[in-house]
Image: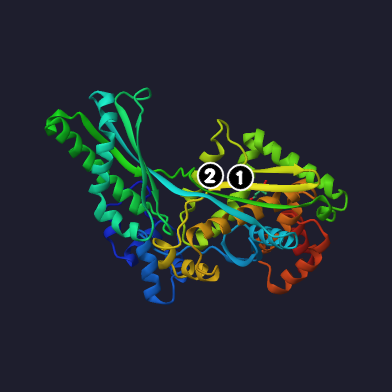
Amino acid sequence: MRRKRDIIIKGFSKLLKEDKLKLVAEYFENPGEVISLLKSFWHTDASQQKLFDEFSENTISNFYIPYGIAPNVMINGRNYLVPMVIEESSVVAAASAAAKFWSERGGFHSEILGTTKIGQVHFSWSGEPHTLFTLLPALKKYLIESVKPITANMEKRGGGIVAIELIDMTDKIDDYYQLRAHFETKDSMGANFINSVLEEFGQSLKVFLAEQYQLSDDDRQCEIIMAILSNYTPECVVKTWVECKFSELENVDERLTGEEFALKFEKAVKIAQVDPYRATTHNKGIYNGIDAVAIATGNDFRAIEAAGHTYASRNGQYESLSWVEIEDDTFRFILEVPLAMGTVGGLTSLHPLAKQSLHLLGNPSAPELMMISSVMGMANNFSAVKSLTTKGIQAGHMKMHLFNILNHFKANDVEKSAAVEFFKDQKVSFASVGQYIDSIRK
Ligand code: MEV
């Protein structure tokens, strides 16, 4: 019996997992099959499955995404095997091809430009603005003292509060001010640490102002609106680049000399610097690589992307995050991205595969992981622009997509092997693969 979609479900989160699953299955014509399908993706080890169930709310199954490896990733003279979790067929292949290409030309170079993160306490103050600023030195001391129980451990690891600013935003919204705090969170991404400190700052700010002005709760001169980290991290940034002589680009494309390829590539990247439509796709290619590493290592890819897109707009228009420099006969391709990543805390050690990914990378520090991730962003960006400016993107993309199309036609292993052979020198498209499968089945 199919359940009506317009009935409001009450107490879903309180149901047992099996009952949630049954309830969801009732929305389908074939509930038994739906239950079997969703259960077939449960982990065979019940304790592992429990771990996954406890990551989130209302879990009824697991959603698989391929876990791949890009080998030969040479960064600052060190060679990495980089784990990438991504569903898009061509991303790992593109990253691996770029990694191999640059490993033969000096590898990737990467440096950290900063690691501090920012959080804000947003509040209203209806008293005199200048009195707040006069009190700022005393307020800072008070705030820092008030969070000592939270910051003590982070300080032992070399992190903590780096600076606190008071920002007058009353030209934008009446009575609106911000405390903007800068944090060093070492190897943790630091969201929970920063948010705990900020919430305490909010409480303490109220108490401090009440004491200074002998305000009662009813005076309401200071209202804490909210306290939260900012996912925009323009002070937590990594710069990555590759470079080589034009002569080392001679064989990239049979129709272009090394110099012609370098100049065409530069033009393509310039287009992404001036046109937001192209910049969005160009940067998407960068995040193909970065997100895949972020997911494989248990990092928050939504936060990472949000920061990157704001950073890409910092000059007033959305632009490409990478650019090209040509100096005499040298081609240099550079990427600068904000990346707030952690290698301790959160899912990094709880998710068994995230932990394994970090092992594979040699248990990097957070800054090292920032470098590795940005390199994979650059690797994917390089491969995409290289294809776009030479043979076009579809040839390689569709070759990698071939198995998805074959699976769509329910091809068996023999048909797949034959198709791989046949399409080595044929154009792959949905129609051409369909025709080929029809022809061999006849
Ligand atoms: C596809 O996932 C990414 C590309 O569109 C990136 C680009 O166009 O630069 C190929």
Residue 425 % position (x, y)? 83, 61
Which residue position holds label 2?
Answer: 308
Image mark count: 2
Residue 367 % position (x, y)? 51, 57
Query: Is residue 277 toward the left or the right of residue 437 in the image?
Result: left
Residue 442 in sight: no
- The amino acid sitting under disc 2 is Gly
What is the crowding at mark 2: few (fewer than 14 residues within 10 Å), some, or many (at least 20)? many
Query: Residue extending furthest bottom?
Result: 45
Which residue position holds label 1?
Answer: 283
Q: In which quarter of the image is the C terminus?
A: bottom right
Position of 269 relative to 196 (above/below)? above
Residue 336 % position (x, y)? 59, 46
Provide the secondary structure element on which disc 1 rests. helix
Distance (Cα) linking label 2 and label 1: 9 Å
Residue 260 % position (x, y)? 84, 45
Q: Which residue occupies 75% across, 50% down?
A: 386
